[in-house]
Image: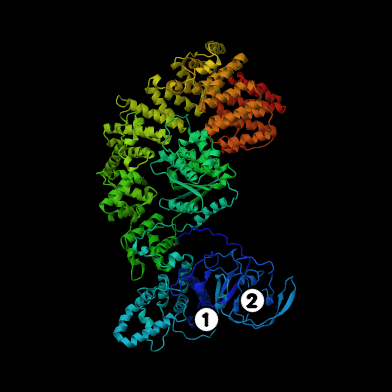
Amino acid sequence: MQTSLKRHNTSPNMSGGKSLAASLQDLLSSGAFTTSTFLLKNEESTSSTPHAAFNPSQTQILNAAKISLLLSRAFAKYQAGAHASLDVSSLHLGDFTIHLGYSLPSPPPQNVVNAPAGDLDSVISDISSHQIEDISTHLDYSLPPPPFEPLFSFDEGGSDSSLQFISEFFDMDKPLPQWTGQQQPTQQKNTATNQVTSAPGGRDQTIARKPAPRLSFHDVLSSEGFNRVWTLISIECIPSAGIYVSTTTPEQALGDLIYCIFSGCNLKLSSNLIQQSSEIVSNNGEGRAAKMKSNTKETLFSTLVGNGTFPTSICRLLSDLLCGDSHIGREVGQSNFFDKCCADRLHSCPISVQDVIEDLEHMCVYPQIYLYDPATEFYSTHLLFGQRLYGRKKELTQLLGITTSLETGLPSRGAECILVSGGAGSGKTHFVSNVATFLSNIGWIVSSASCGRDMGHRSAEAVLSLLDTLIDKTVAEGKSATLLDVLDSTTLKSLSSYLPSLRGVSGNADRSPSQSNRPEMSQLQLTFLLSQLMSAILMLNRRVVLFLDNFEHVDSSALDLLSEILTSVGRLPNGRNNFLFIGCYRDGIGERHPLTAHLSEFRRHHDIGLTEINLNKLSIDDVTDIIMTELRLPRRLVVELANIVHKKTSGHALFVVQLLNSLVRDSVLAFSPMKRRFDWDSAKVRSLKTADNVASLVVSNLNSLNAGEIRTLRVLSCFGMQSKLSVLALMNDSCLFGGVDPYLQSLIEGGMIETTDSFVVFTHDLIQQGVYNDIPTEERRRLHLNIGIWYGMKVSLDQHSMVGQIEEIDFYRLSFVERNVETQEINAIIGLATNQVNRVDPKSIELSDRIRFARWNMVAATQFAKSFNFGASAHYCRKGIGLLYDNLWCNETFDLCRALHEGAASALLFLCDTQEALKYANILIDKLPFADSLAAQYIVLRSLERVGNYEEQVARGLDVLRGLKLDIPEKPSLSAAIDAMAHTSNIASKYSVEQITSLMRSGTSVDKRKKDILLSLNSIIAGAFRSSSPFFPLITCAVVNYSLQNGVYEESALSFACLGYFKLALTGNFEEARYWADATEQILSKSSNSIAASRARIFLYGFVDCWYMPLRETGSNLLSINKGAVAMGDVESAVHSMLFSLRCSFYGGENLSLLLTSHVELLRAMKRYRELVKVALIDVVMIETLTGMKSNAFDVFDGTIPTENFILADAKVKQNIVAIELVHTRRFFTSFWFGDYQSAIESDKAASSVPSSKMLKLWTIYR
C-alpha cells in the first residue's frame, strides 16, 4: 500500500453519544446516503455537501462502500457458521441490522445529568413528532462506552478516544427495551416488563416498561438540528425467514446485496439478468444466444460502467461477483444461462468473499486511489512507477516517532541524529525526501543537500549549504532581527564569508564572496562559530531538519564540521528538542572509510542521540502495494504480476521500479479500453528475458531511445548526478552538443531524469553510473575534454590562468552574462570546467594541454580559497600538481608549481591536516630560496605547533630567525638573555609609549612580507613558551628589535608583552615591566580582533597584569577575551583564556564545586581539541582531590585520555614543559594540603627540575 503520511488530530472533547440500530433496508430507504456522513472507526470527521440523488457524490459512494464493507464482514461471519450454502445465498437486505453510533458535539447542559429512564419514551415520541430542535439535549450522557470489535481485520484495535458510544442499541422498528445498565442483545424482542435499574444515587428501583413507539430511521434523520454524522459500529445478520432454495451462489448473493446498497433499490441484479437473458433466448433464437455466449459478460461490465451510476471499481467488483464460477442447479427453463454466459471470462476473475472484504477495505481507506474514478489524465498520460513512497511502514513509524517525541517536548538523548543506510537502489533518498516533505508541510524548516560521487573535496560546501539554506528560510520568516539580537556583529562578519545568506541578516543583499581581507581562520575556528550559529537559530523556537544525502561521499574535514555542530546542539537543553539531523549513506563502507570512525564516535557520544535505520529489500507485499497503487487495482488482480516482478528483481527497490517502467515502455503493461484498466499477460511477463541487475537493465533500456536522447543522457552523466539548468543552457549554442533542452521532457517521462527546483537530476545514481559506464572509453575522454574546454571558454580560463591573474577577471564581460547566470555561479562553472578535464587520464593528454589544465586548477583553487572552501582549494592544487607529474619545477612550470604547492599547504593547514601541510611546505622550502620560502616556513611552524611538537618548532624557528639575520646566540644563557634585554631597552629608551604606538602600520602602509614574518615569529614565541625553551627571552628580544626597526604591527604586541614578563621574572624591574605592558595595551587598543591580538592579551593579563591588579579583575579580563574569541571563532584563544580565568578564580578562593562544574563544561565543549584541554584536566584532578567529588571528566574523551599519568607521559614525549610542570605542581599542592609532606617534597623536586619552574608564574608563589 502506498504509505500515507497523515497526522491524526484529536477531535474536540465529546461528552457522550448514542447508538441506533436499523435494518439495512430501512437505512437505504431513508435517504441517509445523501444526507449523512458515515465514519469508520478511528476515522476523522469531515464535512461534505451531498449532491443530488441522481448524481451520486463521492460522499454517497464512500458511504455505500463503507456500508458494503460491514455487510460483507457480516455475510462472511454468517457464512462461516453452521449454515447451509443455500441459506447464505438466500439472504437479503432485510436480514441485516446496522448499528450506528452518533457522537455528541457539545457537553451536556448543567441541568441534564442522568436523564430519568422513563423520559426515553418521550424523547422518541418527540423525535417522531419533530418537536425536538436539538436531539443532543435529550440524550443520556452517563452511559458507559461499549466494547466492540475492530472494524478491519488488520486493525489492532483500541477505541478512539474522540468518540464515546453508549452500550445500548436501539432497534427503532421494534418495541424499545428499557435500559438496565447492561447491554441488551440486539435481536431481543421482548415486550414491556418490569426490570430493575440503577437510579441516580445508586438506589435500585423498579420501572414499568412502556410500549415504545415504532418509527423508522427516516424519522431520526428528519429531526431538526441533527448532526447526521454517524460512526459505523457493526452489521449483524439476523435472518427473518427460514431456509429456502436459491438460484445463486453465495458470491452472487453478496453481489446482489452490494448492488442494492449502491443502487438504492431492492431489485437483485442477478434476477434481473436472468429474466433479461430468458427473454433474449426466447425472442432471438439459437443464433442470438450463441452471440450472447461470448458477449454477455462484457455486456454486464460495460452496462454497469455505461450507466454512470457506479464507479468503475464497483462495476468491476460486481461483475466479478455475479459472473464468477457457479455450479449450483438451475430451475428448468433457465437453460443454465449463467453457465453459458460465464464461459468466456473476459472481465471477471475468481473471487471469494474475503477478496471482496479486502477490496472494500482498500476502497474505504484510500478512496481516491481504489474507489473513485480517476481523472482522464490517469489513462491519457504516461504511467510512471517510483513517484510515491511504498511500504517501509516499520521504518516510517520509527522515524516519525522521533519527530513526535521532539514536538511533544519529551526529554531527548542529545542532538537527534538519524542515519538511514541501505544498499544501492534501496530507496534511501526517496524515503527520507518524502518524510522531509511531510515535516515541511506541518511547519518544520527543512534544509537538504547532497554530496555527489567524486565530489568529496567539496563536501564542506554541502554541509555549509545546509546552514545557508536554513538561514535563508529563517530570514524569509522575518527572523533577522531576532538573529541579530543573538549573534554579535563580529560573529556575523566572520561567518558571512562562508554563509552568504548571513549578509541578508545584517541587511546586505549582496551574496557574492567578500573580497575584503580578514584574519586567518582555521577549521577549528569555523566549527566553533557554526556551533554558535546553530545555537542562535534553535533559540528562535523553530523546529529544524537538516538532511544530508550521500553521506558516504563526505570527507573527514566535513564530517568533523558536522560532528561539531551536532555536539554543540546536543548540549543545548532546550534547543536540541527543535533539531533533527538525517543522513543517508550506502552500505558497504570499509573500516578505513572516514565515515566508519565517525559512526563509532556517534554511537558512543553522550551528546548525540543516534538512531540507525537500515532499509532492506522490498517484500512481496511491498511490490504488490506498488503495483496496486499505481494501477489503482485490487490486490487479487495484481498479486500474480507482483510475484513475477519480485522474483525477477529479488525485491531490489530500484530494480522493481525500472522493470515495471520497462514493461510500460514496451507496452507489455498497457491500458485496455475494453476492461477500463491497465492489463497485462502474466505468462508473457514471466517469459520475458530481463537483465540480471539494475545497471544492466538501465543499459538495455537505452536501446529504446533515439540518438539525441542517448547523446543527452551521456552528456548529463559526465556532469554527475545533477546539473543546474542555467549551466546546461550555456551548451545550447554549442555545435558539439546541440543543446540538451529538446530531449529533457522525453527523458523525464521515461523516468531516467527529473527536474527539482533549478536542477536536472538522475532519478538514481545507479542510472547515472549505468549510462556513464556505457559510454565507450575514447568517446568518454572526448566528451570530458570538449565539455571542459567549452565551459573554460565561457569563463575565459585561458586568458586568466596565469598565476595571480584571476583577480582581473571582469565577470560582467563574460559571454554568458546575458543568459542571467548569477555571479555566485562563477565558481561552480570554473570548478565544472576543471573537473571535466581532471576526469581524463593525464597520460592521454599532451604536455602543453596538461600545463594549460594545471593552470586551470590553480585558478579554481584560488577562487575556492577566496570563498573559504579550502577542501576544494586543496583538491585542485593536488590535481594541478598531478597533471605536471613529469614536468615539475622546470623553467616553464616553476612559478606554477610554487603556487600550487603553496595553495595546497595553506589549505591543508586550515583543514588541520598537518602532516600533508608539512609535506607540501617542506617541498617549497627545499625548492625555493630562503627569502621566498617565508610563507612555507610559517606553515611548517604552525603545523608543528598544532601537533604539539614544540621542541622541533623552536628549532625550526631559530633557523628562520637566523635566516632573517636576527642576532640569536648559538648557546643561550642567563647572561645572554640579560644582555639582550638591556640592548632592547636601550633601543626602546628613545621612544615613549605614545611614540612606539605611532610606529604602527595600518591600511596602505602595511608591508605584507613583514607582517608574515611577524606571524612566523609569533608562532615561534608560542612554541618557546610551551616548551620553556632557554631561547625564549632571546627570541622575544629579537622580535621586539625587528618591530622597532621595521614598523610596529598588531603581531608585535605578543613580543612586547613577553618582554614585560621577562623584566619581571629575570630582573625584578616592575617599573620597566609596566612600561612594556603599557606599550602592549596601546598597540592592542589600535588592533583588530585577531588571533595575534588575542594571544597577546592572554599573555599580558595572565602573566604581567596579574602582578598589578587583583586576581578577580585579572580573571574578569581573561573572561572578556574568551567571549571575544568565541565570537570570532578563535578556539585556541577561547580555551586558554578560559583556563587562565578559572585558574585565577581557583587561587582567588572561588567555590570549588562551581569551578569543577565550569571545568567539566569547558572540557565537553572543547573535547575535540585534545592538545588544548589536557592542562584543564590537570586542574580538574586537583579540584576533585580537594573536594572528594567525582566529575568523570576523563570519560568525556572516551578513553583517548585515560589518566593524568597519560597526560604526563605524552607531555614528556612532546616536550610540553609547561604541562609537565603543571602535573608535578598539582601533585605537590594536594600532597601538602593533605599532610603527605614526603610526597610533597618529591613532587616539588620534580617540578623544580623543569626549566619552566625558574620562570615566574601565578602558581609558583603558592608553591
Mark 2 or 1: the one toward you? 2
| Residue at which label 2 appears | 123
Nearest to the observer: residue 229 or residue 436: 229
Question: How far separated are the C-alphas under marks 2 and 1?
Answer: 26 Å
277, 79: nearer the viewer: 277
Residue 771 shows up from this direction:
yes
Residue 1020 in picture, x, y percent from top left: 50, 22
Q: Can you say whether 491 is above or below 1041 in the image?
A: below
Please name the amino acid that badge 2 sits on.
Answer: Val
Q: Quadrant of residue 1155?
A: top right
Which quadrant of the structure image shows residue 263? bottom left
- Amino acid type, label 1: Gly
Where, quadrant-wise, is the C terminus in this rendering? top right
Is residue 153 toward the left or the right of residue 106 in the image? left
Q: Is residue 706 left or right of residue 829?
A: left
Report the disc number at residue 94.
1
**Residue at 33 percent of width and 49 percent of height:** 770
Q: Residues within 10 Å of mark 1 (few under 14, many from 20)?
A: some
Q: Nearer the viewer, residue 944 or 749?
A: 749
Secondary structure type for disc 2: helix
* Scheme of image coloration: rainbow
